[in-house]
């Protein structure tokens, strides 16, 4: 029985500190460092990151309760589809199940004009960030959402317009999906509204679903 919090792009494992504090410490929870996993994967690409994440999860005691934000939500969804027997609970924050091509292109262009110094503290350098986002362009889990073995709790900030449509669609298409909007929050719900997020996770039955 293992709870795993997976951070988003540009964040680090410490971005979950306010949430776990609001949960009373969330004893036993784990938080992988995606930048470290990407380095271990040997290539700044999503396939390499997913392979490294899957390997990181392999020795963890079942069932897993996966809670991911943004890129972390994509990894959590992907893993739950590939390993339904291992995942007992799934919370997806600001998720995308089919990569928005226009948004990715805009993000890539934005990264290209930003100075290297702007990526300090993001865990990845400028070229790595560009390569990683470009490698996600073909991801599409829309035909597999019906395969989810546990009903996903889908969470999105009320002000996160870029991801709210996908969050609503994912919750509607996945078996037993539930949508929760976080009032006043934008994209980084774990940083902007940690206490509200903790309350949603606690009250929704996310931890009970995994037997925690």
Image (tube, rainbow, N blue to C red):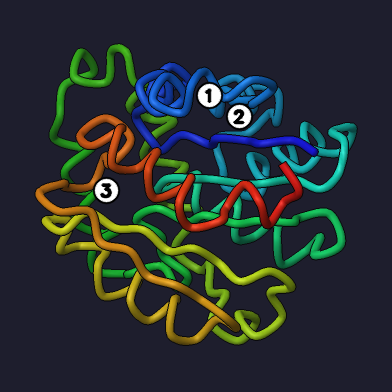
Disc 1: which residue: 35
Q: Position of residue 88 (x, y in %)?
A: 74, 56
Question: Between disc 2 and disc 3, whose residue precedes?
Answer: 2
Label for residue 156?
A: none
| Nearer to us in this view, 18 or 81 | 18
Name the residue located 42 percent from the left edge and 19 percent from the top edge: 21
Q: CA distance from mark 1 to mark 2?
A: 5 Å
* Residue 58, horizontal then vertical, whole percent: 86, 38
Query: Residue at the spot x=27%, y=48% of the render?
Result: 108
User: Quadrant location of the C terminus?
Assistant: top right
Look at the image and tell me in which quarter the N terminus lies: top right
The residue where tag 2 is placed is: 38
Q: Residue at x 87, y 36 (%)?
A: 61
Q: Is residue 3 left or right of residue 96?
A: right
Report if residue 72 is visible in the image.
Answer: yes
x and y percentages locating residue 186 in the rendered image: 16, 47
Secondary structure of residue under mark 2: helix
Quarter residue 194 falls in: top left
| Distance CA(mark 1)–CA(mark 3) | 18 Å
Using the rendered view, name the quadrant where residue 41 is placed.
top right
Side of 182 relative to 17 (left or right): left
Q: Find out whether the residues at labels 1 and 2 contact each other: C-beta distance under 8 Å.
A: yes
Q: Where does label 3 land, which residue?
A: 108
**62 above or below 113?**
below
Is residue 191 shown left or right of residue 150? left
The local secondary structure at tag 3 comes to helix
Residue 210 on image: x %, y %: 72, 51
Dot 1 crowding, Cα within 10 Å, few <14, some 14–19, many 20+: many
First along the sequence among labels 1 and 3: 1
Assess disc 3: are there few (<14), some (14-19) or many (≥20) residues with their C-alpha within 10 Å of its C-alpha: some
Q: SS class of the residue under badge 1? A: helix
């Amino acid at each position: 029985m293992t709870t795993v919090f997976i951070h988003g792009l540009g964040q680090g494992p410490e971005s979950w500190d306010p949430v776990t504090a609001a949960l009373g410490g969330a004893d036993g929870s784990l938080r992988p460092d995606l930048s470290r996993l990407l380095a271990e994967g040997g290539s700044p690409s999503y396939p390499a990151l997913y392979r490294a994440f899957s390997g990181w999860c392999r020795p963890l005691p079942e069932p897993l309760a996966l809670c991911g934000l943004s890129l972390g939500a994509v990894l959590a969804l992907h893993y739950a589809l590939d390993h339904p027997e291992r995942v007992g609970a799934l919370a997806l924050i600001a998720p995308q199940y089919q990569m928005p091509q226009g948004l990715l292109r805009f993000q890539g262009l934005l990264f290209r004009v930003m100075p290297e110094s702007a990526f300090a503290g993001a865990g990845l350098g400028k070229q790595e960030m560009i390569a990683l986002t470009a490698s996600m362009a073909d991801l599409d889990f829309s035909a597999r959402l019906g395969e989810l073995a546990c009903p996903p709790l889908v969470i999105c900030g009320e002000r996160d317009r870029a991801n709210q449509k996908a969050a609503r669609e994912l919750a509607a298409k996945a078996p037993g999906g539930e949508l929760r909007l976080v009032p006043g929050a934008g994209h980084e719900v774990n940083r902007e509204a940690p206490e509200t997020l903790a309350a949603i996770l606690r009250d929704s039955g996310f931890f009970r679903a995994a037997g925690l």
